[in-house]
Image (cartoon, rainbow, N blue to C red):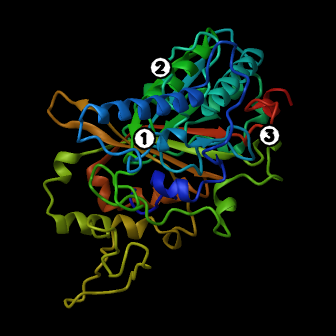
Amino acid sequence: MPDQSTPGTTASSARKAPSPEASPSDAAPRNDAPQGVMSRRRLLGTAGATGLALGTAGAAVGYAAAPSPAKAVPLTSVGADMAMFHGKHQPGITTALHACGHLVAFDLTAGAGRREAAALLRRWSVTARRLMAGEAAGHEDTDIARDAGPSSLTVTFGFGHSFFARTGLEKQRPVALDPLPDFSSDRLDKARSDGDLWVQIGANDALVAFHALRAIQKDAGAAARVRWQMNGFNRSPGATAEPMSARNLMGQIDGTRNPKPGEPDFDGRVFVPASGTPEWMANGSYAVVRRIRMLLDDWEKLSGKAQEDVIGRKKSDGAPLSGGTETTAMDLEKTDADGNLVVPVNAHARITRPDQNGGAAMLRRPFSFHDGIGADGTPDAGLLFVCWQADPVRGFVPVQRKLDRGDALSAYVRHESSGLFAVPGGAAEGEYVGQRLLEG
């Protein structure tokens, strides 16, 4: 888990070097909001101006603790960041890690088929575009996020294996969407696995993310019902003094060796080529979603040294046990004074390396989760693992098989749910997501 890092894991780094899906934070909002509904983006500006006026008034009556306007930190910086809905790829894949998110799967209802699915994806696409631009959802908006900007909101849509039979599109189902093999470490809850449709929502504000979740759920109407839903979080933007890789709930630097946009083989690893098959998946990707519970009580009984041996990296800064910094190449042959490998043979970071798996790699973009304390007193917490690849048979499957055969971390995690979804390329202006499949 921890040895592949999502690029741009902090908001500050995302603002300095926006992802291909991001737009400048001062981009003009779309003007197709309903009459009488002011966009959240305009409200944000109004709120900012009001705040300055109140601050000035407060200073006049002697509130010495209030900072002067010249030194005030703008509180709107996170909220103003905006990702684009339309593009070559769907948003939420190469976008920087979000502070909070929701994963939700839907099943089409009895009697709903291809026509109803097309209408649903059309509604969802319109809603996603509006919300990502900082506008109201449209019909009967709940106003949950009325005071906030877009907050880097992204909404991503995918299709599960069962979707194609439900809509009479079996001939268009990709071979890459064949069910994942069984793994010995799986303890899967079928009720929280798979689904006809999958939606990933991410934002840097919890209310913005929930607002999108509620709008998507309402838009489903009579066409689809929620099969399962999971909530996750990451470190908040600006929480660290400088940009750095994320940490998971085990306290480990999580994901140092993630492929990064701009690397020569990045697109080939993550996205289906424009010439790929089926045609409707051009520029798309395949998402593997796993709810991985961390057995934190058992993990925290280990000494710091034992934890580092399980992972193969230092807990403090993510550097390999063979020496250097987080990004230093791991020396797999280095031994200590007694002739023992410095990076144990079953260390997680050793096993997950692409050069130990025939070059297999995937883009990990996870969330942490905590769903309370179980009846036995242990935390129901861990990782909502989401990884992206051009083909799961060449990405996730070989790595998970290797982990299944002898990963030291396996004793401290439990795979409790699983799903595989085909995520088509981005929608062009005037299109909805999946249109080339549903109307092709």
Position of 348 relative to 208 (above/below): below
- The numbered disc on residue 75 is 1
Q: Nearer the viewer, residue 169 or 316?
A: 316
At x 45% / y 42%, what residue is drawn?
290
Report the amino acid beneath label 1: Leu
Q: CA distance from mark 2 to mark 3?
A: 35 Å
Image quadrant in which the N terminus is located: bottom left
Left or right: 216 in relation to 329 = right
Report the amino acid beneath label 2: Ile
Q: CA distance from mark 2 to mark 1?
A: 19 Å
Q: CA distance from mark 3 to mark 1?
A: 42 Å
> Who comes first in sequence, dot 2 or dot 1?
1
Give how far across and how far down residue 29 sits, in percent: 67, 33
Left or right: 237 in relation to 143 = left
Give how far across and how far down residue 221 sits, in percent: 61, 10
- The numbered disc on residue 144 is 2
